[in-house]
Amino acid sequence: MVKEFIAQSPEILPDTFESTWSSPSNIALVKYWGKKEGQIPANPSISFTLDHCATTTRVKFTRKETPGISFDLLFEGEPKPSFKPKIQQFIDRILPYMEFLEGYHLEIDTSNSFPHSSGIASSASGMSALALCLMSLEAALSGAEEDANFYKKASFLARLGSGSACRSLEGPLVSWGQHEHISGSSDLYGTPYRGQLHKTFLDYRDTILLVDKGQKQVSSTVGHGLMHGHPYAEARFEQAHRNLAELLEVLQNGDSRAFIRIVESEALTLHAMMMSSNPYFILMKPNTLEIINKVWDFREKTGSALCFTLDAGANVHLLYPGSEADEVMKFIEDELVDYCEQGQYICDRIGEGAKRR
Ligand code: DP6
């Protein structure tokens, strides 16, 4: 238990309360892969907060007499029983920090700005939006402001739902996990990047090429588990520390070649970890590799700062400065859409974080 985050339960609870938050997804530049008991990351990570790919969640709290967790879940207006276990687990984990929740029935109504069958994980945006709704009730009960402490606890709670969710509340970059060069960094919550940011990163784009829109072959929870006893785990965790240290400098000096080197290496290392785990997985598809090779050719020919990153799946995130948007979009349309399932991709950009609705 982390004492700092235990809420006092007030004597009298209001009969009803309602809160709505919209929270974006994020894309990691240095990847979180591997965790310890209690959702503690094995290494620090950092991500761009996205803008367009987001989850909007409304929670209606209604006072009830019998204590215990009670909630209904609607996804895009329809009951969604398959999402309930993950939410139940989340509420079980956060209950010691918000005991007053037992006094309420929760009606959770959630929807995504991106299609559910896009292969884009909604756990980061979904868990952070839900955590913020719960924090709004806590703030209303205690009369607290929506200040830095509000976001810190919301991030702490979101982490208990899904690790990467703790990086989805603020923008434009958030790190998570203790790192010697990031003051205030913690394994318990995300820390918004407060260093100098080179102007090139103020307008960065992420175009997500949907190579495989199917369900994930390996859930991230199972994937993280594969790092236990992995022969390369320790070296990987150290590498993440070094890559993050180097990336912090790049964020200030705008060195696009170094940025590309770190980000692409992180993506390939993540997949290398999966390929060398027991059991092993290949989460890329042939079209993922086709796209990577095309991106390398394009960069070679044009000197562009375009680079790719990957999550634990086959979709490719293309990262590039807004100043190159016209050329890169033309390249995508001319040469990459054929590798996307039904020619689909999603255009996103670096964003400012969650918003109250
Ligand atoms: C590959 O946050 O989805 O996207 O904590 O088990 O919910 P859980 O895992 P999750 O893992 C995300 C892994 C990643 C890399 C990253 O976002 O850093």
Image (spheres, rainbow, N blue to C red):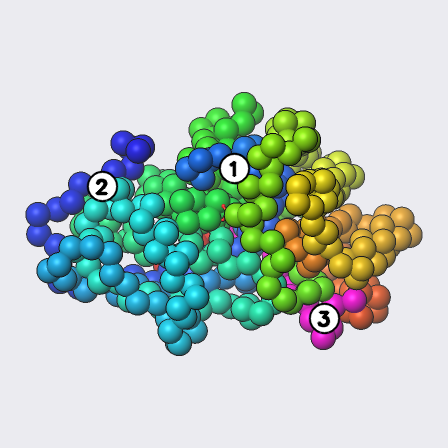
Residue type at the position of mark 2: Ala
x and y percentages locating residue 184 in the rendered image: 44, 28
Q: What residue span does the magenta drawing correspond to? A: 339-352
Q: Which mark is residue 341?
A: 3
Instruction: Please tell me which residue lies in front, 153 or 232.
Output: 232
Residue type at the position of mark 3: Glu
* Disc 3/disc 2 C-alpha distance (Å): 47 Å
Residue type at the position of mark 1: Lys
Q: Report which residue position mark 1 lands on.
A: 35
x and y percentages locating residue 205 in the rendered image: 66, 55
Contact, mark 2 vs mark 1 (Cβ under 8 Å): no
Residue depth check, mark 3 versus mark 2: number of the one nearer the observer: 3
Q: Residue 7 carries which label?
A: 2
Residue depth check, mark 2 versus mark 1: number of the one nearer the observer: 1
Taking the spot 73% from the left edge, 55% from the top edge, the residue there is 284
Q: Residues within 10 Å of mark 1 (few under 14, many from 20)?
A: some
